[in-house]
Image: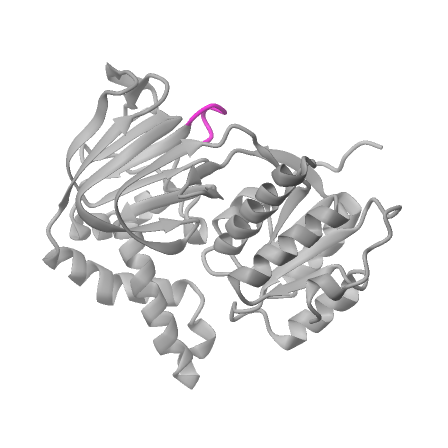
């Protein structure tokens, strides 16, 4: 693909034009896929990013050209990066944000379960493009701000450790011809959990974490999802003790459709915080109910919050939008004040 700066600008009168940004490093983004996508959109509307620098340049170009809709392909992490960069570029220029959309080209794809994006198998991406032009509706999506990134979910502890193990298993599967086609799917994810993550967590001690409420008052949620227990005001400690995992989200789903955050959509002005202090064998024994979002246990604590700070006694791996960003002892997560508009394949089309 040509450098985005050298692409002739699109016709301003075409208000229905769609920019597609794909992660050129994603395994599903092949030369054949890029060629087909390029044929489906108008010349100059497909952008392939293979580095952070290219991605930021593409975001500037998209904002300058005023696309009303921007689709991202490459997984939740690609969506997080593109939305963050486009938002930053739009704010610098004082321009409105476009509507964003999600093409299911990555691994996990938590957002796909929220907006109804189809699987890549059976040319699902191309079906979504056709649906977008004929019937795609819109909805608002609230995001978190973590480490300067706008994301629907993030967390520290076991989930980030599993991601690192998953990357290792994907690489091993990719090098084995008979396993290559399973490298980016649930089989590789399950293999990572069973062969690497569970043994690692059995041997790894729990880490001490202190979570402080930096925003509006909150209470712990009971098994029925209703507030219970003491009121935690701004500046007070939400949780102080051992944990395996601290995760939070504005959407119910984790990767592969796991409904890990059953209360994330209960309030527009809050996101769900979940603190997990369960051993790996306990988690493995109840994985089906955890996946469905129906499992409750005293070692799982849920809160609806709008701003928190997290403090560990030693560095812990942090994932943002399903991508590892490094180890942190201290970080913050807050509900970003402005929701974005996203393409909703479940939703009705707009009324003319």
Task: In this rendered view, identify the residue nearer to me: 18 or 302.
Answer: 18
- Who's the residue at 80% across and 64% down the image? 43
The residue lying furthest to the bottom in this view is 177
Give the left or right position of residue 214, taking residue 23 as reference: left
Q: How many marks?
A: 0
- Who's the residue at 42% across and 42% down the image? 153
Residue 127 % position (x, y):
70, 58
Query: Per the image, is 158 magenta?
Result: no
Give the left or right position of residue 131, taking residue 53 as reference: right
Q: Is residue 240 above or below residue 21?
A: above
| Colour setting | one colour
- Who's the residue at 71% across and 70% down the image? 2
Q: Quadrant of the N terminus?
A: bottom right
Give the left or right position of residue 2, taking residue 224 as reference: right
The quadrant holding residue 190 is: bottom left
Residue 63 % position (x, y):
69, 47
Q: Can residue 199 be spotted in the picture? A: yes
The residue lying furthest to the front in this view is 92
- Who's the residue at 52% across and 67% down the image? 26
Residue 129 % position (x, y):
72, 55
Q: Can residue 251 be spotted in the picture? A: no
Q: Quadrant of the C terminus?
A: top right
Residue segment shown in magenta: 265-270
Q: Is residue 20 above or below residue 26?
A: above
Q: Main secondary structure of the magenta part?
A: loop
Residue 145 % position (x, y):
44, 38
């Amino acid at each position: 693909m040509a450098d985005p700066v050298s692409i002739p600008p699109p016709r301003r009168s075409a208000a229905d034009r769609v920019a597609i940004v794909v992660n050129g490093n994603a395994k599903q983004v092949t030369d054949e896929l890029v060629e087909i996508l390029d044929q489906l959109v108008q010349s100059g509307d497909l952008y392939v990013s293979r580095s952070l620098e290219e991605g930021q340049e593409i975001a500037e170009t998209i904002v300058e050209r005023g696309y009303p809709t921007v689709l991202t392909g490459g997984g939740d992490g690609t969506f997080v990066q593109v939305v963050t960069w486009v938002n930053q570029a739009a704010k610098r220029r004082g321009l409105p944000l476009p509507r964003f959309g999600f093409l299911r080209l990555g691994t996990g794809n938590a957002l796909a379960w929220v907006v109804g994006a189809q699987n890549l198998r059976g040319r699902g991406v191309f079906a979504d493009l056709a649906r977008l032009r004929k019937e795609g509706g819109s909805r608002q999506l609230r995001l978190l701000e973590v480490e300067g990134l706008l994301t629907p979910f993030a967390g520290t502890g076991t989930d980030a450790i599993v991601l690192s193990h998953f990357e290792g298993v994907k690489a091993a599967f990719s090098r084995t011809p008979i396993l290559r086609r399973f490298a980016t799917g649930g089989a590789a994810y399950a293999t990572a959990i069973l062969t690497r993550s569970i043994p690692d967590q059995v041997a790894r001690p729990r880490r001490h974490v202190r979570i402080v409420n930096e925003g509006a008052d909150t209470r712990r949620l009971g098994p029925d999802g209703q507030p219970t227990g003491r009121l935690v005001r701004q500046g007070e400690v939400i949780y102080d003790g051992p944990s395996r995992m601290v995760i939070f989200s504005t959407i119910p789903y984790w990767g592969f459709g796991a409904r890990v955050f059953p209360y994330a959509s209960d309030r527009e002005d809050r996101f769900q915080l979940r603190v997990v202090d369960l051993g790996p064998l306990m988690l493995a024994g109840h994985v089906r109910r955890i996946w469905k979002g129906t499992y409750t246990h005293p070692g799982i604590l849920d809160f609806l919050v709008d701003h928190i700070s997290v403090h560990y006694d030693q560095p812990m791996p942090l994932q943002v939008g399903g991508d590892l960003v490094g180890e942190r002892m201290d970080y913050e997560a807050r509900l970003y004040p402005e929701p974005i508009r996203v393409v909703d394949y479940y939703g009705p089309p707009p009324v003319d």
